[in-house]
Image (spheres, rainbow, N blue to C red):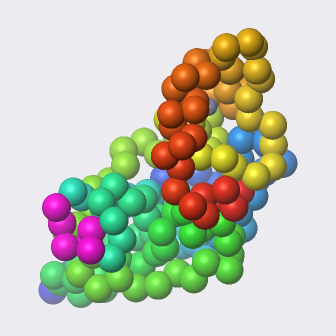
Amino acid sequence: MTIEPIPVGHKTLRLRQLSPKRGPSFSPNLYRWMRDCAHFYTDGGVAQAVYRVKNDSPATSYLGAGTLVIGIPMHGYPGDKDFSGAPLIGVLCKGSSEPRVCFANLVPDLELVEGFWDRYLAVGRCAIDPDHNEHFLGGARFQEHGDHRTCLWCGATQHNEHRQASGAARPAGVALAA
Ligand SMILES: [Zn+2]
C-alpha cells in the first residue's frame, strides 16, 4: 500500500526568510528551532505547520485547549495519528533547546492554523500573538501615544484599558518568550 504524503507547511518558504536579521518582529528562538529541529522538503520548502489544540479534545488534559504546537503529522504508516513537534511557546522560550518530541495520537486533536507562515512573514510574532497579550523579549514592539499604543510590527493600535486588562491575564512564564 502506498502512503500518499499530505503536503503541510509552506512549500516555497525558505529558512532564511525567517531570520531575525530581517526585522525585530521575527523570533530569534523560532528561527533557531527551525534551523536545528525542523523538517524541510527536498527542494527547501518548510514542512512544519502550526496547529491549535481543539477544545474538548483529549489533548487539552496535557497541552491545554487552544495551545499552539508546531510540527508535522508523522504519517509513518496507514492510520498513524502521531505528531512530531513541540509546543510553540516552548520554542519561543527555549529555541533549539526545546526538544522535538512525538505526541502519540495527537493529530485528531489538532486543527491547522491556516495561513500561519504567510502571516508570520508579514507581521512576525504578531501572527502568534494577535491580541498583543504577550511580552516578547528583544525588539521594540510598541510606540506609546498618551492613552494608546501602536504596534510597530503590525500597525495595530490598542487603548491602555485593553492593555492593562490583557496584561493582568498574562500567564506566568510567558515573559521569557523571544
Ligand atoms: Zn502587532
Left or right: 79, with 35 as reference point? left
Q: Quadrant of residue 16?
A: bottom right
Q: Which residues are magenta?
A: 56-61
**2 or 34: which is nearer to us?**
34
Compared to residue 52, the image places residue 62 above or below, namely below
Q: Quadrant of residue 24?
A: top right
Evaluate whether residue 11 shows in this view. Answer: no
Question: Would you place residue 139 above or below residue 46 in this image?
Answer: above
Q: Quadrant of the N terminus?
A: bottom left
- Residue lying at 67% horizontally and 56% vertically, measured from the top left: 175
Q: Judge whether residue 139 is colored magenta.
A: no
Q: Position of residue 177 (x, y in %)?
A: 66, 59
Nearer-the-camera pick, 65 or 5:
65
Residue 93 at x, y = what percent? 66, 66
The question of residue 60 being in magenta is answered with: yes
Q: Looking at the image, which residue is at 37% across and 49% down?
A: 113
Q: Quadrant of ligand 1?
A: top right
> Is residue 145 visible to us here?
yes
Q: Dividing the image into 4 quarters, which one contains the C terminus? A: bottom right
Figure label count: 0
Q: What secondary structure characterizes most of the magenta part?
A: helix
Residue closer to the observer: 158 or 30: 158
Q: Which residue sits at x=59%, y=46%?
A: 134
Seen in the image, is 100 located left or right of residue 102?
right
Classify residue 144 as left or right of residue 37: right
Residue at 67% x, 72% y is 94
